[in-house]
């Protein structure tokens, strides 16, 4: 598929909490097409992080990010995949806090004993860590001791 600049109404990081989450093929295609840098910016705003902090979590240098932004080139697959990973966790936390975005941001940035004292955002820097954060949210939702 050819890369298209996403419109503000069509932000992937904002779509992740919709029913399309159940359609992995949709997300795989979007990541393979290359997410626009605007998705990085939208996620950064949602999480309340600095450019430098999110860039480190996504594994992209700020220089590369700036170059892609200036050249209007998409993020590569690995970076796009990480963007989706963090967006997915953000919306799962928002759902857990019944729509409380501030509470979700706070929880994601707070150390959790069940995650070896790391914050959920730090623990989710790998896919296996992200799955553990999702599992933790599920356990908390059902009142299972974490």
Image (cartoon, rainbow, N blue to C red):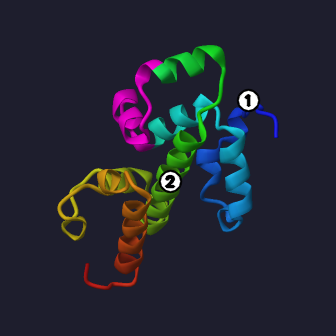
Q: Which residue is mark 1?
A: 5
Q: Secondary structure at mark 2?
A: helix
Q: Is residue 43 above or below residue 26?
A: above
Q: Mark 1 Cα within 10 Å, few/some/many (few <14, many 20+)?
A: some
Give me the disc on residue 116.
none
In-image side of 60 versus 53 (left or right) = right
* Quarter of the N terminus within the rendering: top right
As for residue 4 lying within the magenta part, the answer is no
**How dense is the environment of label 2, judged by Cα within 10 Å: few (below 14), some, or many (20 and up)?**
many
* Quadrant where the C terminus is found in the figure: bottom left
In x, y percent, where is residue 89? 46, 58
Would residue 89 be found to the left or right of residue 80 on screen?
left
Q: CA distance from mark 2 to mark 1?
A: 20 Å
Residue with the mark numbered 2: 85
Relative to 119, does residue 60 appear above or below in the rendering? above
In the depicted structure, whether residue 135 falls above or below residue 128? below
Magenta-drawn segment: 47-63
Residue 25 is situated, as x and y percent measured from the top left of the image, at: 73, 60
Count the labels in the image: 2
Image: 82 above or below 69:
below
Q: Position of residue 6 (x, y in %)?
A: 72, 34
- Residue 63 appears left or right of 17: left
Residue at 37 percent of width and 65 percent of height: 133
Which residue is the extreme one toward the top?
70
Judged left or right of residue 115, residue 94 is right
Residue at the spot 64% in from the left edge and 37% down from the top edge: 35
- Magenta stretch mostly in which secondary structure? helix
Q: Secondary structure at mark 1?
A: loop
Dot 2 or dot 1: first in sequence order is 1
Which quarter of the figure has residue 127?
Answer: bottom left
Which residue is painted at 67% across and 68% down in the image?
Answer: 22
């Amino acid at each position: 598929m050819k890369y298209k600049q996403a419109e503000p109404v069509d932000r992937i990081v904002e779509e992740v909490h919709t029913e399309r989450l159940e359609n992995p093929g949709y997300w795989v295609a979007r990541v393979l097409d290359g997410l626009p840098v605007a998705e990085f910016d939208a996620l950064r705003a949602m999480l309340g992080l600095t450019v430098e902090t999110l860039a480190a979590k996504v594994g992209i240098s700020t220089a590369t990010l700036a170059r892609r932004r200036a050249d209007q080139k998409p993020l590569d697959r690995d970076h796009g995949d990480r963007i989706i990973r963090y967006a997915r966790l953000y919306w799962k936390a928002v759902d857990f806090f019944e729509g409380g975005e501030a509470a979700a941001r706070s929880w994601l940035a707070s150390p959790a004993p069940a995650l070896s004292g790391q914050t959920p955002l730090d623990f989710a820097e790998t896919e296996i860590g992200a799955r553990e954060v999702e599992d933790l949210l599920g356990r908390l939702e059902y009142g299972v001791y974490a």
